Image (tube, coloured by chain):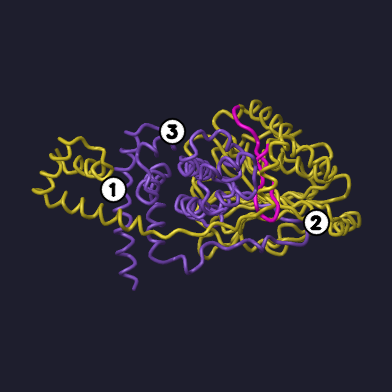
Chain colours: A yellow, B purple
Amino acid sequence: MSCSVYRTAISRYLDEALSEAERRHLLAHVQSCSQCAATLAEYRALETVLRRAQGIHAPSFSQSWLSASAANARRASLFRSSITNLGLVSAGAIAAGLVLLLASSLFLFVTGGPSNIPPIPALAAIEPGPRAGAEDTGARSGQHSSPDTTAARASTRSNPDDMKVKASRPFAVGYQPAGQPARVPIYTSPTADLAVVYTALGDSLTRPGKPLDLSGTLPPEATVERVMIERAPAPSQAYYLEVVFALPTGTRYRLQEISADAPPPSTPGVAEEGTLLIAGKAWKYGYIVPRDPRGETVRVFRSTAGNRITNLEAAAPLDEMVQMLQYLR
Amino acid sequence: MSGISVAALVEQARAQNPEAMAWLYQEYADRICSHAYRMLGSRQDAEDITQETFIRAFRSIGQLRDEERLSAWLYSIASHLCLDHLRRRKLIAWLPWSGEDGSQERGEDSVADVEETDLVRRALQELPPKDRACLALRSIEGFSCGEIAEMLKCSEAAVWNRLARARAKFATAYRDMQREEARQR
């Protein structure tokens, strides 16, 4: 037997998974083989190192999320009922957001997603606000806010029930070769639908001539006001997508999406998550789109004070997602 | 609640007794959070996974047949959540049209975390997720291979094989990182 085989046996020896005969055989070999003796000594030392490894403290226990968790059984339809309670603004916005996220999932589902991309601190420089990033690239000249837009923006600020959405993490993702601009604008439009957006994105990246037809995926009440896509310089396929949309109430939202810095998984599934702040409460949401999308559900996590309370299912967006995936397959 | 057995606390938690739930959380949360941290390499993600683990556990605690296996059950939930989390690859960021910019987000690890233990955590990150889970559950948390097999829903032989691979790779990664640290000093 080679020493590599004995290395496996040494591991099993530490796990007490060898028979008595195997154990005796191994120990006899170790006594005569300096390499295996060193391996055993190293493994034993590392077991000690691992046992000594310090942990971290969990977040403090929160009565609020506990209470909500305890009440979870009564909240099977919380997502929908909460949407109702929060009114059309939030309902439409969440639906629009989920659909937008779905659309981005679908893009990656079909294309296989961007290639392996190292971190890009520069994308963290994207500023929030109505003219965010406009000065960065100069690619958005000619986009002017109408008076209606300004009024709607003011309305957004004053409405306590507005869906305030925050980044769940810093934007330290993407790719930026040294000495090159952080982002390359590839598409911008004051008005567009997602079909056009993803066509542009697909053409720019991995699907030349094969646009994604995602028309009809936006909820009818949502109006896309501006779409902007930028990508990192080649060879990266990292991209940045910004969509501004409004609901009939005048409330306006901005979705920012930055492609991941991780390589695509070997299976054609995608997953996403984020945090929404609605009326002072944080909502965690996530999509799971596995190999067979019909076997999964959209998950929506509701939480307060940053603590997750429950994990719920949103049926309507899922139906849309399944329909779209079936259509695209 | 000191002096009350875990079994009794589980029984009370089944009745959604908040005090029992709080006690169970305080008893196990640090360990679960540490395990998630080793699995994910991110404190923030580990905290999220910890909370979700307990939310799921409290929601389905009625399904826990053997109260004495609460610890393994919690680790099982946490491990699966971590593996699910690691399968995710996309980052979606939402920002408000005006106002906040998400700057309240906590940063990643503090400098104090990046000490000797960090070497272990970084070396663990070099392992495939399931191998990492096996090694962490076995060598750090002290579960038996049978328990790990049950947690991860695989055979005991598969756990042995994963552990063998994990130890070999962890040893190499840890050795290399130690050398690198020494060289930089």
- Whether residue A91 sits left or right of residue B164 in the image: it is right
Discs 3 and 2 carry the same chain letter: no
Residue, disc 2: A143
Give the number of the mark in front: 3 or 1: 3
Q: Quadrant of the C terminus of chain A?
A: top right
* Residue drawn 64% across the image and 33% down it: A297
Give the residues in magenta: A295-312
Q: Position of residue A272 (x, y in %)?
A: 61, 44
Q: Position of residue A276 (x, y in %)?
A: 71, 50
Q: Is residue A210 magenta?
A: no
Callout 2: SS? loop
Q: Disc number at residue B153?
A: 3
Hey, what amino acid is under mark 2? Gln
- Whether residue A145 sits left or right of residue B27 in the image: it is right
- Residue A98 visible in the current orientation: yes
Q: Disc number at residue B54?
A: none
Separation of residues labelled 3 and 1 (CA atoms): 23 Å
Residue, disc 1: B168
Hey, what amino acid is under mark 3? Lys
* Residue drawn 46% across the image and 40% down it: B69
